[in-house]
Amino acid sequence: MLSSRRMFVSKISKMLVAGITAVVMTGCASYSTPEPQKDIVDTAVSAGTFNTLATALTEAGLIDTLKGPGPFTVFAPTDEAFAKIPADQLSALLADKEKLTSILTYHVVAGKVMAADVVGLDSATTVQGQSITISASDGVKVDNANVVQTDIVASNGVIHVIDTVLIPQG
């Protein structure tokens, strides 16, 4: 009688261990980091705080570029950042495709530069051709903009959110 009870307990224990293992393995799989499915543009649009940036990218004809394979690092100004520009100046900027393209490409660095890499840099060359200044002495700043959120990973790069629109020199 005792040995059949031990066999029963042993079988139940094995079934419980197998069941718990299956649950744990399934749970771990669901917590693995999936590859992002959205590109930089779709990621920014779905956030809901980059409407002006999306409009500007459309006006400049840069949507297809930033939906391309990349990788790109985008220092993305929020709608609040664009709101710092007086309305008449922003309207004029959106109407000037050449100047708008220059400003927008000044926010993009070729390659995927994560926050851990950004803090180790003094500057980075933008797609526009000029360099942005990077400082990590008091928070992270890119030129005169504060980086307020980092490492929003997209399928073709990464977005770092900034609080001010960057304006290239000259």
Image (cartoon, rainbow, N blue to C red):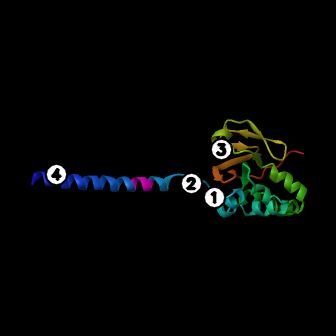
User: Which comes before the other along the chain, label 4 or label 1?
Assistant: 4
Give amino acid for label 4.
Arg
Give amino acid for label 3.
Met
Could you tell me how far apart the alpha carbons at marks 3 and 2 are, in whole angstroms?
17 Å
Local SS, label 2:
loop
User: Which comes before the other along the chain, label 3 or label 1?
Assistant: 1
**What is the crowding at mark 3: few (fewer than 14 residues within 10 Å), some, or many (at least 20)?**
some
**What is the crowding at mark 1: few (fewer than 14 residues within 10 Å), some, or many (at least 20)?**
few
Mark 3, residue position: 114
Q: Is residue 32 above or below residue 54?
A: above
Mark 4, residue position: 6
Start-end of magenta stretch: 23-27
Which one is closest to the eye, mark 4 or mark 3?
4
Left or right, residue 115 beside residue 167: left
* Circle number at residue 34: 2
Residue at image position (70%, 47%) is 146
Could you tell me how far apart the alpha carbons at marks 4 and 3 are, in whole angstroms?
56 Å
Mark 1, residue position: 37
**What is the crowding at mark 2: few (fewer than 14 residues within 10 Å), some, or many (at least 20)?**
few
User: Which comes before the other along the chain, label 4 or label 3?
Assistant: 4
Left or right, residue 155 beside residue 18: right
